Image (tube, rainbow, N blue to C red):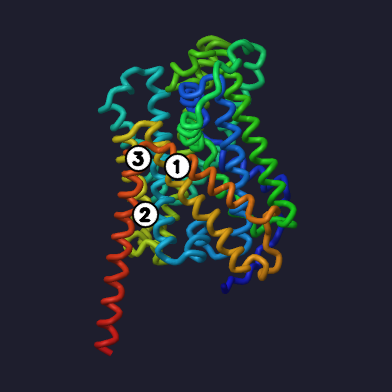
Amino acid sequence: MKEPKEDLKRTISLTGLSANIINSVVGAGIFVIPAVVAAGLGSASILAYLICGVLVILIMLCFAEVGSIITNSGGTYAYIETTFGKYAGFITANLYLIAAVTADAAIANALANIIGTFFPVFRGEFIQVSFFLIIFAGLAFVNIRGAEQGVRFVTIFSIMKTIPLLFIIFIGFKDIDITNLYFESIPSLKKLGEVSLVLFFAFQGAEIGLSISGEVMQPQKTIPRAIFLSVLFILILYILIQTVSQGILGNELANYKDNPLGEVAKRIFGPVGLTLISIGAAVSMFGSVSGGVLSNPRVIFSASKDGVIPVDLLSSIHKKFATPHVAILVYATSAFLFASFGGFKQLAVISSAAILIIYLGVALAVIKLRRKGIEAKKAGSFRIPGGYTVPVLSVIIILFFLSSLTAGEIKTTLISIGLLSLIYAGIHLYNENRSKKSKIQE
Protein backbone atom coordinates (compact mmCIF):
# COMPACT_ATOMS: atom_id res chain seq x y z
CA MET A 1 0.00 0.00 0.00
CA LYS A 2 1.82 3.09 -1.23
CA GLU A 3 1.27 6.22 0.83
CA PRO A 4 2.10 9.82 0.00
CA LYS A 5 4.86 11.54 1.92
CA GLU A 6 3.57 13.68 4.75
CA ASP A 7 5.15 17.11 5.17
CA LEU A 8 2.59 18.53 7.61
CA LYS A 9 3.86 19.99 10.87
CA ARG A 10 2.52 18.32 14.01
CA THR A 11 1.45 21.38 15.99
CA ILE A 12 -2.08 20.51 17.18
CA SER A 13 -2.33 19.74 20.88
CA LEU A 14 -4.76 17.60 22.87
CA THR A 15 -6.86 20.70 23.58
CA GLY A 16 -6.94 21.72 19.91
CA LEU A 17 -7.97 18.29 18.61
CA SER A 18 -10.61 17.88 21.33
CA ALA A 19 -12.09 21.30 20.56
CA ASN A 20 -12.20 20.52 16.83
CA ILE A 21 -14.11 17.26 17.44
CA ILE A 22 -16.57 19.02 19.78
CA ASN A 23 -17.16 21.80 17.26
CA SER A 24 -17.79 19.24 14.50
CA VAL A 25 -20.39 17.30 16.51
CA VAL A 26 -22.34 19.83 18.59
CA GLY A 27 -24.74 21.42 16.15
CA ALA A 28 -28.35 22.15 15.42
CA GLY A 29 -29.81 18.68 16.04
CA ILE A 30 -29.61 18.91 19.83
CA PHE A 31 -32.08 21.83 19.82
CA VAL A 32 -34.95 19.55 18.75
CA ILE A 33 -33.76 16.04 19.67
CA PRO A 34 -34.72 16.20 23.41
CA ALA A 35 -38.46 16.14 22.59
CA VAL A 36 -38.08 13.34 20.02
CA VAL A 37 -36.13 11.19 22.51
CA ALA A 38 -38.58 11.96 25.32
CA ALA A 39 -41.51 10.93 23.11
CA GLY A 40 -39.95 7.49 22.74
CA LEU A 41 -38.30 6.84 26.11
CA GLY A 42 -39.60 9.45 28.58
CA SER A 43 -37.39 9.81 31.65
CA ALA A 44 -35.30 6.80 30.53
CA SER A 45 -33.88 8.90 27.68
CA ILE A 46 -30.44 8.92 29.29
CA LEU A 47 -29.97 5.27 28.27
CA ALA A 48 -30.08 6.17 24.56
CA TYR A 49 -27.50 8.92 25.11
CA LEU A 50 -25.15 6.49 26.84
CA ILE A 51 -25.44 3.94 24.02
CA CYS A 52 -24.77 6.60 21.36
CA GLY A 53 -21.82 7.95 23.36
CA VAL A 54 -20.22 4.51 23.63
CA LEU A 55 -20.71 3.88 19.89
CA VAL A 56 -19.13 7.22 18.96
CA ILE A 57 -16.04 6.47 21.09
CA LEU A 58 -15.66 3.03 19.51
CA ILE A 59 -16.16 4.31 15.96
CA MET A 60 -13.76 7.23 16.40
CA LEU A 61 -11.06 4.84 17.63
CA CYS A 62 -11.61 2.86 14.42
CA PHE A 63 -11.29 6.08 12.40
CA ALA A 64 -8.09 6.96 14.25
CA GLU A 65 -6.49 3.60 13.43
CA VAL A 66 -7.52 3.47 9.77
CA GLY A 67 -6.71 7.16 9.29
CA SER A 68 -3.18 6.66 10.62
CA ILE A 69 -2.61 3.86 8.08
CA ILE A 70 -4.36 5.27 4.99
CA THR A 71 -3.38 8.91 4.58
CA ASN A 72 -4.68 9.42 1.01
CA SER A 73 -6.87 12.46 0.42
CA GLY A 74 -10.59 11.75 0.43
CA GLY A 75 -11.17 10.91 4.08
CA THR A 76 -13.75 8.23 4.82
CA TYR A 77 -14.35 7.06 1.26
CA ALA A 78 -10.58 6.82 0.73
CA TYR A 79 -10.28 4.52 3.76
CA ILE A 80 -12.97 2.19 2.47
CA GLU A 81 -11.94 2.35 -1.20
CA THR A 82 -8.30 1.58 -0.37
CA THR A 83 -9.33 -1.35 1.82
CA PHE A 84 -12.22 -2.87 -0.16
CA GLY A 85 -11.86 -1.53 -3.72
CA LYS A 86 -13.42 1.02 -6.08
CA TYR A 87 -16.98 -0.31 -5.86
CA ALA A 88 -17.01 0.10 -2.06
CA GLY A 89 -15.50 3.57 -2.45
CA PHE A 90 -18.21 4.56 -4.95
CA ILE A 91 -21.01 3.37 -2.64
CA THR A 92 -19.40 5.12 0.35
CA ALA A 93 -19.00 8.45 -1.45
CA ASN A 94 -22.64 8.44 -2.51
CA LEU A 95 -23.94 7.31 0.89
CA TYR A 96 -21.93 10.12 2.49
CA LEU A 97 -23.57 12.64 0.20
CA ILE A 98 -27.02 11.19 0.94
CA ALA A 99 -26.28 11.50 4.67
CA ALA A 100 -25.05 15.09 4.27
CA VAL A 101 -27.94 16.24 2.06
CA THR A 102 -30.63 14.71 4.28
CA ALA A 103 -28.94 16.13 7.40
CA ASP A 104 -29.06 19.66 5.99
CA ALA A 105 -32.63 19.09 4.81
CA ALA A 106 -33.62 17.85 8.30
CA ILE A 107 -32.08 20.91 9.94
CA ALA A 108 -33.85 23.20 7.46
CA ASN A 109 -37.14 21.56 8.52
CA ALA A 110 -36.29 22.10 12.19
CA LEU A 111 -35.51 25.76 11.44
CA ALA A 112 -38.87 26.21 9.68
CA ASN A 113 -40.65 24.55 12.63
CA ILE A 114 -39.00 26.88 15.16
CA ILE A 115 -39.98 29.94 13.12
CA GLY A 116 -43.47 28.42 12.91
CA THR A 117 -43.81 28.60 16.70
CA PHE A 118 -43.75 32.42 16.36
CA PHE A 119 -45.33 32.80 12.93
CA PRO A 120 -47.96 30.06 12.35
CA VAL A 121 -48.01 30.90 8.62
CA PHE A 122 -44.69 29.00 8.38
CA ARG A 123 -46.56 25.78 9.14
CA GLY A 124 -48.21 25.98 5.73
CA GLU A 125 -46.73 23.69 3.07
CA PHE A 126 -46.41 26.36 0.37
CA ILE A 127 -44.69 28.83 2.73
CA GLN A 128 -42.29 26.14 3.99
CA VAL A 129 -41.30 25.08 0.47
CA SER A 130 -40.79 28.72 -0.49
CA PHE A 131 -38.68 29.19 2.65
CA PHE A 132 -36.50 26.19 1.72
CA LEU A 133 -36.08 27.56 -1.79
CA ILE A 134 -34.93 30.94 -0.47
CA ILE A 135 -32.46 29.34 1.99
CA PHE A 136 -30.79 26.91 -0.39
CA ALA A 137 -30.87 29.21 -3.43
CA GLY A 138 -29.42 32.03 -1.32
CA LEU A 139 -26.64 29.91 0.15
CA ALA A 140 -25.82 28.49 -3.28
CA PHE A 141 -25.54 32.05 -4.65
CA VAL A 142 -23.25 33.11 -1.77
CA ASN A 143 -20.98 30.08 -2.13
CA ILE A 144 -20.79 30.25 -5.92
CA ARG A 145 -19.51 33.83 -5.60
CA GLY A 146 -16.66 32.62 -3.38
CA ALA A 147 -15.71 30.41 -0.43
CA GLU A 148 -14.58 33.43 1.58
CA GLN A 149 -18.15 34.63 2.02
CA GLY A 150 -19.25 31.12 2.99
CA VAL A 151 -16.51 30.82 5.60
CA ARG A 152 -17.60 34.09 7.21
CA PHE A 153 -21.11 32.69 7.68
CA VAL A 154 -19.82 29.44 9.21
CA THR A 155 -17.30 31.13 11.53
CA ILE A 156 -19.88 33.50 13.05
CA PHE A 157 -22.48 30.79 13.63
CA SER A 158 -19.94 28.28 15.04
CA ILE A 159 -19.03 30.72 17.81
CA MET A 160 -22.67 31.42 18.68
CA LYS A 161 -24.14 27.91 18.66
CA THR A 162 -23.10 26.73 22.15
CA ILE A 163 -24.19 29.88 24.00
CA PRO A 164 -27.94 29.01 24.24
CA LEU A 165 -27.12 25.44 25.28
CA LEU A 166 -24.94 26.56 28.20
CA PHE A 167 -27.59 29.14 29.05
CA ILE A 168 -30.24 26.42 29.41
CA ILE A 169 -28.01 24.17 31.55
CA PHE A 170 -26.60 26.65 34.07
CA ILE A 171 -29.73 28.73 34.59
CA GLY A 172 -32.30 25.95 34.35
CA PHE A 173 -30.83 23.42 36.77
CA LYS A 174 -32.39 25.11 39.82
CA ASP A 175 -35.91 24.65 38.37
CA ILE A 176 -35.73 20.87 37.92
CA ASP A 177 -38.48 18.82 39.56
CA ILE A 178 -36.67 15.63 40.56
CA THR A 179 -39.86 13.56 40.33
CA ASN A 180 -39.87 14.17 36.55
CA LEU A 181 -36.60 12.22 36.28
CA TYR A 182 -37.74 8.96 37.87
CA PHE A 183 -37.77 6.01 35.46
CA GLU A 184 -41.32 4.89 34.91
CA SER A 185 -40.15 1.67 33.26
CA ILE A 186 -37.14 0.17 31.51
CA PRO A 187 -37.63 0.45 27.71
CA SER A 188 -37.46 -2.60 25.49
CA LEU A 189 -34.38 -3.15 23.31
CA LYS A 190 -36.52 -2.53 20.22
CA LYS A 191 -37.72 0.86 21.47
CA LEU A 192 -34.24 1.76 22.70
CA GLY A 193 -32.81 0.95 19.27
CA GLU A 194 -35.47 2.98 17.43
CA VAL A 195 -34.86 6.09 19.54
CA SER A 196 -31.06 5.69 19.51
CA LEU A 197 -31.13 5.63 15.72
CA VAL A 198 -32.79 9.06 15.65
CA LEU A 199 -30.65 10.40 18.50
CA PHE A 200 -27.46 9.38 16.71
CA PHE A 201 -28.19 12.23 14.30
CA ALA A 202 -26.97 14.61 17.04
CA PHE A 203 -23.71 12.65 17.44
CA GLN A 204 -22.61 12.66 13.80
CA GLY A 205 -19.57 14.53 12.52
CA ALA A 206 -16.74 13.52 14.86
CA GLU A 207 -14.83 12.00 11.94
CA ILE A 208 -14.65 15.50 10.42
CA GLY A 209 -12.92 16.71 13.57
CA LEU A 210 -10.37 13.90 13.22
CA SER A 211 -9.48 15.00 9.67
CA ILE A 212 -6.60 17.08 11.09
CA SER A 213 -4.97 14.02 12.73
CA GLY A 214 -1.95 14.31 10.42
CA GLU A 215 -0.99 17.54 12.22
CA VAL A 216 -1.46 16.27 15.79
CA MET A 217 1.47 16.12 18.21
CA GLN A 218 2.26 12.66 19.60
CA PRO A 219 -0.73 11.07 17.80
CA GLN A 220 -0.40 7.70 19.54
CA LYS A 221 -1.26 9.33 22.86
CA THR A 222 -3.13 12.47 21.80
CA ILE A 223 -5.72 10.94 19.45
CA PRO A 224 -7.30 8.41 21.86
CA ARG A 225 -7.24 10.94 24.71
CA ALA A 226 -8.85 13.63 22.53
CA ILE A 227 -11.55 11.19 21.39
CA PHE A 228 -12.34 10.19 24.96
CA LEU A 229 -12.33 13.74 26.35
CA SER A 230 -14.33 15.30 23.51
CA VAL A 231 -16.99 12.59 23.40
CA LEU A 232 -17.21 12.65 27.20
CA PHE A 233 -17.77 16.43 27.09
CA ILE A 234 -20.41 16.08 24.35
CA LEU A 235 -22.13 13.25 26.21
CA ILE A 236 -22.24 15.22 29.49
CA LEU A 237 -23.48 18.32 27.64
CA TYR A 238 -26.26 16.39 25.90
CA ILE A 239 -27.30 14.50 29.05
CA LEU A 240 -27.45 17.76 31.02
CA ILE A 241 -29.62 19.35 28.31
CA GLN A 242 -31.95 16.33 28.34
CA THR A 243 -32.01 16.26 32.14
CA VAL A 244 -32.89 19.94 32.47
CA SER A 245 -35.54 19.68 29.75
CA GLN A 246 -37.08 16.52 31.24
CA GLY A 247 -36.78 17.83 34.79
CA ILE A 248 -38.63 21.05 34.02
CA LEU A 249 -41.24 19.90 31.51
CA GLY A 250 -41.70 16.28 32.60
CA ASN A 251 -44.04 14.30 30.34
CA GLU A 252 -44.97 17.52 28.54
CA LEU A 253 -41.52 17.61 26.88
CA ALA A 254 -42.70 15.25 24.13
CA ASN A 255 -45.43 17.73 23.18
CA TYR A 256 -42.96 20.46 22.11
CA LYS A 257 -41.23 18.75 19.20
CA ASP A 258 -40.82 21.98 17.21
CA ASN A 259 -38.95 23.93 19.88
CA PRO A 260 -38.44 22.01 23.16
CA LEU A 261 -35.56 24.12 24.51
CA GLY A 262 -37.52 27.28 23.76
CA GLU A 263 -40.34 26.00 25.95
CA VAL A 264 -37.84 25.15 28.71
CA ALA A 265 -36.51 28.72 28.58
CA LYS A 266 -40.07 30.05 28.64
CA ARG A 267 -40.79 28.14 31.86
CA ILE A 268 -37.65 29.63 33.43
CA PHE A 269 -37.77 33.24 32.23
CA GLY A 270 -41.12 33.67 30.53
CA PRO A 271 -41.61 34.90 26.93
CA VAL A 272 -38.17 36.60 26.88
CA GLY A 273 -36.47 33.24 27.48
CA LEU A 274 -38.47 31.61 24.70
CA THR A 275 -37.47 34.38 22.28
CA LEU A 276 -33.75 34.34 23.17
CA ILE A 277 -33.35 30.55 22.98
CA SER A 278 -35.37 30.36 19.78
CA ILE A 279 -33.18 32.99 18.16
CA GLY A 280 -30.07 31.13 19.34
CA ALA A 281 -31.42 27.83 17.99
CA ALA A 282 -32.37 29.41 14.66
CA VAL A 283 -28.91 30.99 14.33
CA SER A 284 -27.25 27.63 15.09
CA MET A 285 -29.45 25.78 12.60
CA PHE A 286 -28.86 28.30 9.85
CA GLY A 287 -25.14 28.12 10.63
CA SER A 288 -25.17 24.32 10.28
CA VAL A 289 -26.94 24.48 6.93
CA SER A 290 -24.50 27.20 5.80
CA GLY A 291 -21.58 24.96 6.75
CA GLY A 292 -23.10 22.06 4.84
CA VAL A 293 -23.59 24.07 1.66
CA LEU A 294 -20.03 25.39 2.01
CA SER A 295 -18.23 22.09 2.65
CA ASN A 296 -20.20 19.23 1.10
CA PRO A 297 -20.26 20.44 -2.53
CA ARG A 298 -16.45 20.35 -2.31
CA VAL A 299 -16.76 16.63 -1.53
CA ILE A 300 -18.82 16.18 -4.71
CA PHE A 301 -16.26 18.22 -6.64
CA SER A 302 -13.31 16.18 -5.30
CA ALA A 303 -15.08 12.87 -5.83
CA SER A 304 -15.81 13.82 -9.45
CA LYS A 305 -12.28 15.05 -10.02
CA ASP A 306 -10.82 11.83 -8.56
CA GLY A 307 -13.18 9.68 -10.65
CA VAL A 308 -15.01 8.27 -7.61
CA ILE A 309 -18.18 9.85 -9.01
CA PRO A 310 -17.42 9.68 -12.74
CA VAL A 311 -19.45 12.69 -13.87
CA ASP A 312 -17.01 15.28 -15.27
CA LEU A 313 -19.57 18.10 -15.15
CA LEU A 314 -19.52 17.98 -11.34
CA SER A 315 -15.83 18.98 -11.31
CA SER A 316 -16.50 22.11 -13.37
CA ILE A 317 -15.10 25.40 -12.04
CA HIS A 318 -16.81 28.76 -12.53
CA LYS A 319 -14.84 30.91 -14.98
CA LYS A 320 -15.27 34.13 -13.01
CA PHE A 321 -15.48 33.07 -9.37
CA ALA A 322 -13.28 29.92 -9.54
CA THR A 323 -15.74 27.91 -7.42
CA PRO A 324 -17.26 24.44 -8.02
CA HIS A 325 -20.55 25.99 -9.13
CA VAL A 326 -22.14 22.88 -10.64
CA ALA A 327 -21.44 20.80 -7.52
CA ILE A 328 -22.86 23.61 -5.35
CA LEU A 329 -26.03 23.83 -7.46
CA VAL A 330 -26.52 20.04 -7.46
CA TYR A 331 -26.05 19.85 -3.69
CA ALA A 332 -28.31 22.81 -2.89
CA THR A 333 -31.03 21.54 -5.25
CA SER A 334 -30.91 18.07 -3.71
CA ALA A 335 -31.14 19.50 -0.18
CA PHE A 336 -34.10 21.67 -1.23
CA LEU A 337 -35.97 18.67 -2.67
CA PHE A 338 -35.37 16.48 0.40
CA ALA A 339 -36.41 19.32 2.73
CA SER A 340 -39.60 19.88 0.74
CA PHE A 341 -40.72 16.24 0.76
CA GLY A 342 -39.57 15.03 4.19
CA GLY A 343 -39.94 15.96 7.87
CA PHE A 344 -37.20 16.30 10.49
CA LYS A 345 -37.48 12.85 12.08
CA GLN A 346 -37.77 11.01 8.76
CA LEU A 347 -34.76 12.83 7.29
CA ALA A 348 -32.73 12.37 10.50
CA VAL A 349 -33.29 8.59 10.32
CA ILE A 350 -32.20 8.48 6.66
CA SER A 351 -29.07 10.49 7.46
CA SER A 352 -28.22 8.36 10.51
CA ALA A 353 -28.74 5.10 8.61
CA ALA A 354 -26.52 6.22 5.72
CA ILE A 355 -23.71 7.39 8.00
CA LEU A 356 -23.96 4.23 10.14
CA ILE A 357 -23.45 2.06 7.04
CA ILE A 358 -20.31 4.08 6.30
CA TYR A 359 -19.14 3.68 9.91
CA LEU A 360 -19.74 -0.06 9.54
CA GLY A 361 -17.37 -0.03 6.56
CA VAL A 362 -14.68 1.74 8.62
CA ALA A 363 -14.98 -0.79 11.48
CA LEU A 364 -14.72 -3.67 8.99
CA ALA A 365 -11.72 -1.94 7.40
CA VAL A 366 -9.90 -2.09 10.75
CA ILE A 367 -10.54 -5.83 10.93
CA LYS A 368 -9.39 -6.46 7.34
CA LEU A 369 -6.24 -4.32 7.63
CA ARG A 370 -5.31 -6.10 10.85
CA ARG A 371 -5.84 -9.52 9.32
CA LYS A 372 -3.43 -8.47 6.57
CA GLY A 373 -1.01 -7.14 9.18
CA ILE A 374 -0.84 -3.77 7.41
CA GLU A 375 -1.15 -1.66 10.56
CA ALA A 376 1.91 -3.36 12.02
CA LYS A 377 3.99 -2.55 8.93
CA LYS A 378 3.45 1.19 8.98
CA ALA A 379 5.67 3.07 11.39
CA GLY A 380 3.89 5.51 13.67
CA SER A 381 0.39 4.19 12.95
CA PHE A 382 -2.13 4.29 15.80
CA ARG A 383 -3.31 0.91 17.08
CA ILE A 384 -6.46 0.46 19.17
CA PRO A 385 -5.70 -1.57 22.33
CA GLY A 386 -7.66 -4.73 23.07
CA GLY A 387 -7.19 -6.64 19.84
CA TYR A 388 -10.38 -6.91 17.76
CA THR A 389 -12.66 -5.91 20.67
CA VAL A 390 -13.35 -2.32 19.57
CA PRO A 391 -14.08 -2.93 15.85
CA VAL A 392 -16.18 -6.02 16.62
CA LEU A 393 -18.22 -4.17 19.26
CA SER A 394 -18.65 -1.30 16.79
CA VAL A 395 -20.04 -3.70 14.17
CA ILE A 396 -22.45 -5.26 16.69
CA ILE A 397 -23.82 -1.92 17.96
CA ILE A 398 -24.17 -0.50 14.44
CA LEU A 399 -26.09 -3.57 13.30
CA PHE A 400 -28.30 -3.20 16.40
CA PHE A 401 -29.06 0.40 15.42
CA LEU A 402 -29.74 -0.50 11.79
CA SER A 403 -32.05 -3.35 12.85
CA SER A 404 -34.37 -0.65 14.23
CA LEU A 405 -35.18 0.59 10.72
CA THR A 406 -38.73 -0.16 9.62
CA ALA A 407 -39.35 -2.67 6.84
CA GLY A 408 -40.04 0.23 4.46
CA GLU A 409 -36.81 2.02 5.45
CA ILE A 410 -34.77 -1.16 5.01
CA LYS A 411 -36.38 -1.71 1.60
CA THR A 412 -35.63 1.88 0.56
CA THR A 413 -32.01 1.53 1.74
CA LEU A 414 -31.49 -1.70 -0.18
CA ILE A 415 -33.11 -0.27 -3.32
CA SER A 416 -30.86 2.81 -3.09
CA ILE A 417 -27.72 0.69 -2.76
CA GLY A 418 -28.99 -1.53 -5.59
CA LEU A 419 -29.51 1.47 -7.88
CA LEU A 420 -26.06 2.81 -7.02
CA SER A 421 -24.63 -0.64 -7.79
CA LEU A 422 -26.33 -0.69 -11.19
CA ILE A 423 -25.01 2.80 -11.94
CA TYR A 424 -21.50 1.69 -10.97
CA ALA A 425 -21.78 -1.45 -13.11
CA GLY A 426 -23.01 0.60 -16.07
CA ILE A 427 -20.16 3.08 -15.75
CA HIS A 428 -17.63 0.28 -15.36
CA LEU A 429 -18.97 -1.50 -18.46
CA TYR A 430 -18.97 1.73 -20.47
CA ASN A 431 -15.35 2.46 -19.51
CA GLU A 432 -14.29 -1.08 -20.41
CA ASN A 433 -15.92 -0.87 -23.85
CA ARG A 434 -14.37 2.54 -24.48
CA SER A 435 -10.97 1.18 -23.47
CA LYS A 436 -11.34 -1.79 -25.83
CA LYS A 437 -12.32 0.48 -28.73
CA SER A 438 -9.31 2.69 -28.08
CA LYS A 439 -6.98 -0.33 -28.19
CA ILE A 440 -8.54 -1.59 -31.44
CA GLN A 441 -8.14 1.84 -33.07
CA GLU A 442 -4.51 1.94 -32.00
- Amino acid type, label 1: Leu
Residue 87 falls left or right of residue 288: left
Q: Which is in the foreground here, disc 1 or disc 2?
A: 1
Question: Would residue 180 be found to the left or right of residue 302 on screen?
Answer: right
* Foreground residue among 213 and 286: 213
Question: Is residue 74 among the parts visible in the rendering?
Answer: yes
Q: Crowding near pointer 1: few (<14 within 10 Å), some, many (20+)?
A: many
Question: CA–CA distance between discs 2 and 3?
Answer: 28 Å
Placement of 236 over or under 175, stated as above or below: below
Q: CA distance from mark 1 to mark 2?
A: 30 Å
- Disc number for residue 24: none
Q: Within the image, what quadrant is residue 243 found in?
A: top right
Q: Who comes first in sequence, dot 1 or dot 3?
A: 1
- Report if residue 157 is visible in the image: no
Q: Report the amino acid beneath label 2.
A: Ala
Locate the N terminus and report the quarter of the image it occupies.
bottom right
Q: Secondary structure at mark 2?
A: helix
Residue bearing mark 1: 402
Q: Secondary structure at mark 1?
A: helix
Q: Quadrant of the C terminus?
A: bottom left
Residue assigned mark 3: 409
Q: Is residue 275 above or below residue 397?
A: above
Up-down relation of residue 128 to residue 328 (above or below): above
Q: CA distance from mark 1 to mark 3?
A: 10 Å
x and y, in percent, of residue 406 in the image: 37, 36
Give the numbered dot on residue 327: 2
